[in-house]
Each structure stands twice: as structure tokens, then as C-alpha cells.
Image (cartoon, coloured by chain):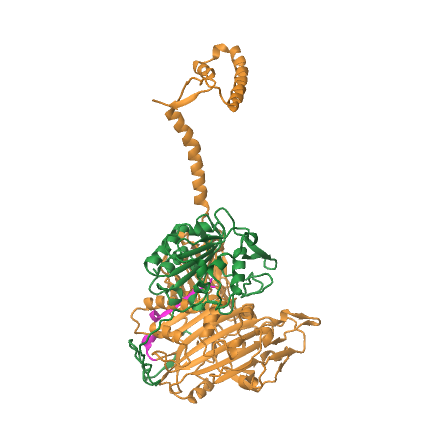
Chain colours: A orange, B green
Amino acid sequence: MAAPCGGSGLGSWLVLLFLFANSLGSDQFDESLLIKPLNSGHVISKFDFVIGTDNISGAHFHLVPRHLAEVISHHHVRELHLSLTQGFWRHDIWGYPARQAGTGAQLWVWFDPGTPSVDESWSSLVNALSGLFCASLNFMDRTVTTSPEFAFRPAGVVSDPSELESRLLRVASLPREATCTENLTPWQKLLPCGAASGLSTLLNPTHLYSTSYHSLSVDFRPVCADTSCSRLHYEITQSVTLVHEPVTTARRDGPRQDWSMKSLFGRGLYDACAVAERSDIFVDTAANGSYPFVLSPAPHSEVTSIVAGHPATYAAYSVTSLTSGGGGVNLRAAYSRPHRHGWTPSLPLTVTQYQTGSGQYSVGLSLQLRNADRLSPLDVSVLQVVPWYIRLYLHTLQVTVDGQVIKPVYQRLVPGRDRQRPYTLELGVRIPAGRVATVSVQAERAFLKWHEYPPDANHGFYLPGAVVSALLPAQNCTRHPIRSPPVEGGRVFVRLSAENQLVTLPTPDFSMPYNVICLVCTVVALAFGPLHNICTKRLLLVPVSEEKPGIVTRIKSNLGRLMWWRRGADQSNTATSQSPAGASQSAAAKAKSSKAD
Amino acid sequence: MLIVVNHIILMLADDMACNPRNPRPATVFNNANQHINVYGSDVEVDYRGDEVTVERLVRLLTGRLEPSTPPTKRLLTDDRSNVLIYMTGHGGDGFLKFQDAEEITSTELADAFEQMWQQRRYNNIFFMIDTCQAASMYEKFYSPNILAVASSQVGEDSLSHHLDSSLGVYVIDKYTYHALDFMEKLRKDSKKSMADFLRVCPRHQCVSTVGVRSDLFPRNPADVRVTEFFGSVRHVERTDRLVDLGDGDTETPVTVGTRVETAAPAPAGSYRYVAQFPVMS
């Protein structure tokens, strides 16, 4: 989970303090809720459920969910990071996320160096996880899986350089994967208190899935047990990140950003989880300057956390004392002024990705990286994974700044292979001060085999967005007061996802075989039948039978003789031109055909 | 809810509840008046989206799955299990459409059931199908112990029940609506028989004629309780053998025929966090 803006880092002494206070041999569980109202009118809520344990293998578990622990130990997993996300994190409006999650399903896993076969463990792991979380993670096969070298470094502790080899890392994403109640249900069952008590009771599907953005994640990693870091401790973090938009409900004097637990989550809070050592609610008061709000009930304390020199204040509640009176608590914020559209933060780095080109043959991908700092350049690490059916022309990959081509600081390009592996592009770009760098590449769209198209082929195929990492100032991050993000060189590590792309591939008309069969059969029937008759049958005269014909036959023959009499009158005028064949034809009123001898 | 959730394998080809076009996310109601949310908070969808194909259904029924398939995606039945299979969608004479791209035919389904019979994977099967010309799907069955009900005969269409104008779609079919209505009134100790259930939705309610195939079923449906298929009725075996459960000491692991791994302590050493951002020289 050493995600940007939300993991426990080296300087986080509060985390280590309560680790000391616990007895050995039993697990610890903390739950917390961070609510951050933004100037744009949105409210970010982040639930964190953290289980700390010394023991991840074996047969007896205390608070660690057995299903997950068995999957982890059976597949030689050292670190596991899974997210199921719906919606796109608008970092240009909401700031940088606490945990990066690309839209859809994303999984990155570090395996132990002693794993007999990483590929087999990976394919077995994604199947096990797909059964555990009711998601189609089994589609993360080798055609979408990659092993990058620079992105997704281990978030937990390592002891040996052999644990850092990229052959032990697998990263895959399924941009099309939806997330719904069936993913929340097993995720909640992994929590020590389930959905019965504590902060997880606030997670109701009807309110969760009406948000602008929601992301469910599970992170497992090894951490230091104490300051000397000589013993291993394992941490499983389950978190939910939501972005609500309460300002859409208007009142008579203008829209308000008033929010409460009932409006965000559908219900109030009744108790804390009984096995939790800490159960907290933090409200980020950074936006209090521009749009002041009053919290009720009043906060129990105020927490200030300084990360990379940037302070942030939070109003803190302890859930146990909040709910001690019984009857439930509805934490509410009342705003004094109506909300006019607030300014969006000016961010040091903004990222956007888009497609270029037209037609059914070629397509281009462009990633735009904007460095808003006018004084110093910004180093950015980019990872782009492209499925094999968008065949990149790697010679057209270039990084341009204002039309000038610049050389990336490093690049690692792994070409894809049809139906076997995707294209992996890793670049390190130094964006000059105040400029926009564009990474662009041209590609051709593959024409798939007819059975490889999904049922709704005309919808298109999804390309996962680029994952961009940088070290940025701490101002615009969503930060947890206790679990501070990793800080390197006085700056915070931030990981962002760019937009997923939807690309249409040339799709055949699947109704074609049916149409072709109908057409060909009709032509054959119309052409072959008469031809066969002409070739194989001949006309023979047969005597007209003596018995009295039926009434219909008599009417028909009368009509026929009438016509023939008329025709005969004409023909007698041109008797010289009459051919013998015509005479024999006209002589027979009824001709019966028979098979040629 | 009469059947425990992990005894249900649910295959949904479309994501309806969390579809962006659903004005009430995470809900699928049986009724335009929103009486029952059938997509409750404990739903578990085992196969969804592109995973729902004819091949996977036949593999699920016959048990020919890849070794890495998790247990929640397996049928895991034996010769004493009663299996309820409910299929709905668009269908025709002898087929049911999957994903608007392929069909499962009645012959395929009959052969899959025969494989199940030969592998001893069921005791009784109750097969319900709600499509147009649904009765054609059970006409080809030839394995014993199958009771089948279909919402319409060959040549008839099954009709939808009513339209939800806020969604713009017909929310439920007539046969399913009345069958669900029958089920909702049922309790776990109900004495209603399968014959009562097979009489659900007569012609004046359903417009189509409900078809029943009971010649392969050895017993009279009037003697079979609905809870045999729609409830988790456990078979209890009585034994007089004494079983030693131990004295409840949690320190010593109890070995019951399988080897139990004791937790290996993490090796001591020096650990460190690594830099997340690559060094750019």
C-alpha cells in the first residue's frame, strides 16, 4: 500500500508507537475514516481498515481473514495490491489521490524470490482472487500482464537485493471491469467486524455506487515491526475511497456543500468495531479557509501532521466516545455560505491522455505532461501498457516539448507479441520548467480472428491509461494524518493514472455469414433448378384422359382454350412463319413432361 | 432467502445494477413500485460479463474446469445433491441465446445433464426456463430424475410483466414475477409441494401456457416438497460412534488426518524500505 499520500512511511512515529504497545502473538486492527471537503464542492471519504499481524501462514489466524491469508501464503506472494475502481480520479479538480487506482481492476504483485514458477503462481493467483472477490480477474493472463522495472517498486520492506528483480513483479489491469455489490460483499466479509459493526456499516451499496468515484482496494505488504526493523510484521489494508458531490442539491438561497453521514453514506454510526484498537474519524479542515463549515458534534481533538514541510490540520473524533451515548451519531457539517464554484488547485503536475488519428487502420496515442513549476524542471516516470492488438510503431515513439523532440532520461521498451504479450513502454521524462511534454506514438489496429471478438465488438477495446509517478510538494495530496505517504528528497511520492482509452478495431459484419448463406442458396436454387430441368427433362405428348375432369380443371382448360383460340387466330394470319416446334407446342393444350429415356 | 449464498452459482451476462444507465445504482427491483430489491447486499455473482459463455456453462455442469478454478466457481455437487437450474433470456425453438452472440441448444443441455448423471453429480434436477418457446429446451432430456418447467410451449412467446417508465425497460417477465411471488410467501418449513409450484401462472395470468416435463422424474410432484429444491435441506446421518474433540487447548494443533503447518517465524535480518521513485541520473 505504499501508495502516494497514504502509506505508512519511515517517519511515521505514531504508527510505530502503537505497534510497541501491543502484545506479541496477536493481531491488531485499526479503522479510520478521513473526510476531506474540497473547494470544488466535492467531498472525499477514505475508509482505511488496517490489520497488522506477525503471522500470515500456518493454520491459525486471529483477525487476519483466512481466505486471503491462505491465498497469499499458497502463492508465495510477498506483496499484493488490488483495486476495483469505477470512475476516473480527476486530479485536476480533486488533487492527488491517496492511493492510485486506474479505472477498472488493477493488480500488482511482488512474489518471493524462491517461487518455483512466477508465471504459474500468477495465473493461479488471479483465478483464486477472481473467486474471492467475484470479479473476472481470471482474464489477467499473459496477454495483459507485464513486469515493469521502474514503476511499482515494492511498497513494503525488503532485505535482499534479489527481492527487487523485476521478474518477480507482475502488473495487470482490466480497464473494462465493472464493480458492483458483488465485489463489496466478499470484501466486507474479510474485515474482522464484517459489515456488522464499526465504520464498515457506513458502506451501503446503494450510496456507494451512486458516487462520482469509488474504489475498493486490498493491499498486503511486509513492514518493519519496530524501529530497528529486524523483524517482519505484515500489514493488510483494506480501503475504500469515495468522492461525493453534495453541492448538487440546491437550496433556495443557493447550493450548499452541507454534508452529513446520512447524506453521504445513508446512515449514521452506532458503534465502533469491538476488536479495533483505534477507531477514528478525521475531517480535513484545509478547505475551512475559503468555505468555512461547522462540525457537529464538535471534534474531540485537533491533529496536525507535517509531511515534507507542509502542515495539515484535521478535526479528530474517537468513534468509541462518539457513540458511547447510544442511539447513533450523524456527523454533520453546516456551511455558512452558499457554494459558488471554487477554484481548482494549481497543481505542479497534470496529466492527460488522448487518441489521435482517424480511420480504421492507424491510431495514435498521446500523453501530455504539464509541469506548472516555472522555476525548476520535473522528473516524471511513465509506464504505458498497450495490448498487442494495437501494434505500436516503436520507431515513432517520441517526447516533444513545444514541437522540439527531447531525449528521455531513460527508456525501456518491450515490444509486444501477437496473442502473447502486450507492449510495455517505460520512460523517464524531464519536463522543463513551465512546459508541456507530450509523449506520442503511432500504431496500427489489428484485424482480429473472428472468434476473438467479444460479443459487443462494436463497443471497442479498452487501453489502460498510463501510470505516471513523480515526487511532488505535499500541498495537494489527500493525506491521512497518521499514515503519511512515502517522502523522498523532501517531496511526496505521487502516482497517477491517466484516462483509459477506448479504441475501435476494424470489426467484420457478423451477420455476414447468415446473409451470404441466404443469398447463395437462393441463387443456387433459382439458377440450378431450371438448368437441371432443361438438361435432364424433355417434353412428351400424352393423351388427354377420357374421364370428366373436375370443375377447376374445366374452368382452367376453358380459359386456356379461349386464350389459345385468340392466339390461334393471330397465328393463322402468319401461318408461313410457324415452326414445327411451335405447332406441336400449340397443338397440345396440356403437355405432360416426363423423364428422358 | 431460502438457499445460502455459497450454494448458488449466479451467471449474469450484463451488469444491470451498476450500469451507468441505472438511475438507482446497485438495485434491481422485481417491481416498478420497488417492492423487493433482488440485488441485495449479499449477492455474489460468480460468472459475469464476458465469462458467461456456453462453453463455461457446460464446463461448470460437467465439471471439466481448469485446475486453478476457485471453489466458488465450481458446482461441487455429489449424488445426493438436488440441483436447481434456472435460465432466462431470449430463446427460440431448441435454443437459448447467450450474450447475443451464441446459443446453447437443447441437445447440448441434454447431453450435459447426461454427463452429470453418469458422473453422479446430482440426485434430482429441477430445471426452470423462462424464454420464448421454452418447452423446446426440455424436450430432448433423456437422463433420469429431472423435473422441468417452462414458461411457454413451442410456438408461444413468453411475455414481460410490466414496464418501469423511469427505467424505460420491462423489468420482469410474467412467469418469473408469479414464481417469485409464490416463493416470497414460502417459509422454510412450508409444506407446499412441487405440484403447487408447477401450477403457478396459469394461462389467464401468463398468456403463455406453462409446460411441465415430469416423465423423467420418478416421484409424483405432489409428494415432493418445494423446500427439497428451494431450501437448504441438510441430509443428516445418524451415528453411534464416539468422536473425541480434544480438550479445547488452543496451543497444540489438532491433527485430524491432514498435516497441519505450524507458522514459521519470520527470519530475523535487516529490512529496509526502498525508494518508490526511480533514480534519474
Residue A520 at x, y percent in the picture: 43, 38
Q: Is residue A147 left or right of residue A554?
A: left
- Is the C terminus of chain A in the top left, top right, bottom left or bottom right quadrant? top left
- Total labels: the figure holds 0
Q: Nearer the viewer, residue B149 or B269?
A: B149
Q: Position of residue A357 (x, y in %)?
A: 49, 55
The answer to whether A396 appears left or right of A557 in the picture is left
Magenta stretch encompasses residue A521: no
Quadrant including the N terminus of chain A = bottom left
Q: Is residue A428 among the parts visible in the rendering?
A: no
Residue furthest out toward the right: A253
Judge whether residue B39 can be spotted in this image: yes
Give coordinates of residue A543: x percent, y percent. 42, 17
Residue at 52%, 63% (x, y): give it: B17
**Does residue A174 show up magenta in the picture?**
yes
Q: Nearer the viewer, residue A218 or A196?
A: A196
Give residue A47's position: percent from left, percent from top.
Answer: 51, 77
Q: Nearer the viewer, residue B221 or A470?
A: B221
Instruction: Identify the magenta region.
Output: A159-177
Q: Quarter of the image holding residue B23?
A: bottom right
**In screen coordinates, is B243 left or right of A34?**
left
Residue A258 lies in quadrant: bottom right
